[in-house]
Amino acid sequence: MKKLDLARALLPDPEVLFLDEPLEGLDPGSARKVKDLLLEMKENGKTVFLTTHNMYVADELCDRVAFIVEGKIALVDSPGELKVKMGKRLVRVEYVAGNDVKIAKFPLENLGRNEEFLNIIKNYEVKRINTEEPTLEEIFLKVTGRRLV
C-alpha cells in the first residue's frame, strides 16, 4: 500500500477502515509510523480490517485474526488464544554441563513434575530460562498445511 493511498483513506476519519497489505513496500521507519497510527485508531474505537501475509504484523496489530483457506475461513481467534489452543508452549533452559552450554526444552504442562527438568535445575548451573510459544506463522502452517507466499 502506498503512503498516499493510506493518507487518502484516512482523510475522512473513517469509523471502519479496510487495508490490504498496509506495510508492504514501506521502509522500517514508515512502517513503524503506520503501525503506530493503526494502533492509535484501535485505541480510539475505530475498526481496522487488514489483509496480510505477514504474521508478525497480524500478531502485533490485530485483536482477532482469521486464516482463510481456499476461500473459506478456517479459524478465527485472538493471536494469544490461537497460540494457547493450537501451539505447544515450551520452557527453554540454557545450562552449563562440564565445559559446554547445553539447551533443553520441556513442555510447560506439568513442568514441576518433569524429572529431567528438575534434575537440570538442581544439579547444573542454569544460565537462562525462558518460555517459547508458537508463532502465528507456525499456527498458519499447522492449520493450512502450506507455506505463506
Image (spheres, rainbow, N blue to C red):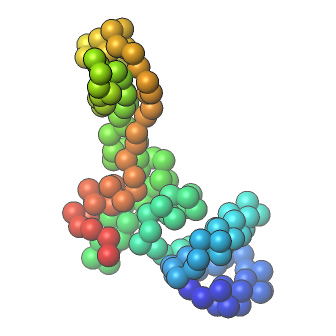
Q: Quadrant of residue 69?
A: bottom left
Q: Is residue 84 left or right of residue 25?
A: left
Q: Is residue 43 left or right of residue 64?
A: right
- Where residue 64 sits in the image (x, y, percent)? 51, 59
**Residue 54 spot, x, y in % from top left:** 44, 68
Decide if residue 40 is in sight here.
Answer: yes
Query: Relative to residue 81, is residue 43 depicted above or below?
Result: below
| Above or below 88: residue 7 | below
Residue at position x 37%, y 37% from top?
Answer: 89
- Measured as percent of width and height from the top left, residue 45 is found at 73, 64
Image quarter where the C terminus lies is bottom left
Count numbered badges in the picture: 0
Q: Is residue 105 above or below residue 22?
A: above
- Looking at the image, which is closer to me, 8 or 4? 4
Quarter of the image for residue 17 reads bottom right
Q: Residue furthest top?
A: 122
Instruction: State which quarter of the image contains the N terminus.
Output: bottom right
Image location of residue 111, percent across then percent down: 35, 20
Look at 33% across and 47% down and name the residue there.
86
Foreground: 56 or 62?
56
Residue 107 can be seen, yes or no: no
Q: Quadrant of residue 76?
A: bottom left
Image point (34%, 13%), residue name: 124
Identity of the residue furthest to the left in this view: 145
Q: Residue at x 71, y 86 (%)?
A: 7
Query: Where is 31 relative to 77, above or below?
Result: below
